[in-house]
Image (tube, rainbow, N blue to C red):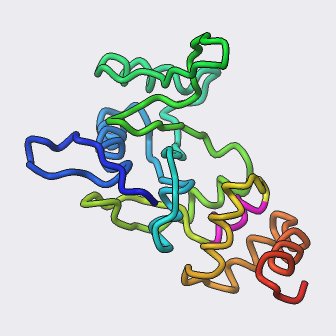
């Protein structure tokens, strides 16, 4: 990953790792009761398991404070009062529209409710790791592998290969997650094609 920094902690005379400042602000959401709990997924979680890889956003898997139609509005209201706003995307004609990420301390951030069994399982079986100087719950490598297998975008394949080659994996846990989510065939095809393993 390219070294990207935010400067939330300028008063402490240090630079933060990519996502660290945003995580500090997200901890405030939990402290103020706007969310019950959260864990970090996506590329930032992958980086906690492997050598640095490129990522340009922060995925926050969160448990909402209450059930409802618009679970994100209280979060966005709080963040916007603090001066954070959605990314602006300009198309080829120069038209500007609001992006899906809210930018917190320089980090494009997406909030995701675990609405399927895979994400729910991942959210309920996290581990504690350091992002810069902040200890935070992150998704385990085995769950990230299953999530990336389901997505299979180009950028996900790169992270998937890195996790399979470098992360310390619990083989039994990975097999169970793949079985529970009907991903065994995808896993076998992927590892055969990209890693040369028997499929």
Residue 117 percent coordinates (x, y): 74, 54
Residue 144 forms part of the magenta stretch: yes
Residue 59 percent coordinates (x, y): 53, 46
Of residues 121 and 49, which is closer to you in this image?
Answer: 49
What secondary structure predominates along the stretch shown in magenta?
Answer: helix
Of residues 195 and 146, which is closer to you in this image?
Answer: 195
What residue is rendered at 46% in x and 60% in y? Answer: 1
Whether residue 79 sits left or right of residue 188 in the image: it is left
Q: In this view, does 77 lie above or below 137?
A: above
What residue is rendered at 75% in x and 76% in y? Answer: 176
Of residues 154 and 72, which is closer to you in this image?
Answer: 154
Whether residue 111 sits left or right of residue 21 in the image: it is right
Residue 34 forms part of the magenta stretch: no
Q: Please tell me in which quadrant of the rendered image residue 179 appears.
A: bottom right
Q: In this view, does 125 lie above or below 37?
A: below
Of residues 137 and 68, which is closer to you in this image?
Answer: 137
Whether residue 182 sits left or right of residue 19 in the image: it is right
Residue 98 percent coordinates (x, y): 56, 18
Whether residue 154 sits left or right of residue 198 in the image: it is left
Q: What stretch is highlighted in magenta?
A: 142-149
What residue is rendered at 54% in x and 46% in y? Answer: 61
Task: Name the residue at the bottom extreme.
Answer: 198
């Amino acid at each position: 990953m390219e070294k990207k920094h935010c400067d939330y902690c300028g008063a402490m005379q240090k630079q933060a790792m990519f996502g660290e400042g945003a995580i500090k602000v997200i901890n405030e959401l939990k402290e103020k009761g706007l969310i019950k709990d959260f864990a970090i997924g996506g590329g930032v979680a992958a980086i906690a398991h492997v050598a640095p890889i490129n990522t340009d956003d922060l995925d926050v898997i969160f448990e909402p404070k209450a059930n409802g139609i618009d679970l994100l509005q209280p979060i966005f209201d709080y963040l916007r009062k603090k001066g954070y706003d959605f990314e602006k995307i300009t198309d080829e004609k120069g038209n500007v529209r609001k992006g899906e990420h809210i930018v917190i301390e320089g980090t494009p951030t997406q909030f995701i409710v675990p609405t399927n069994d895979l994400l729910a399982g991942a959210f309920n079986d996290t581990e504690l790791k350091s992002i810069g100087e902040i200890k935070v719950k992150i998704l385990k490598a085995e769950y990230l592998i299953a999530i990336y297998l389901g997505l299979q975008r180009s950028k996900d394949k790169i992270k998937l290969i890195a996790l399979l080659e470098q992360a310390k994996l619990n083989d039994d846990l990975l097999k169970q997650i793949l079985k529970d989510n009907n991903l065994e065939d995808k896993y076998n095809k992927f590892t055969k094609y990209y890693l040369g393993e028997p499929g």
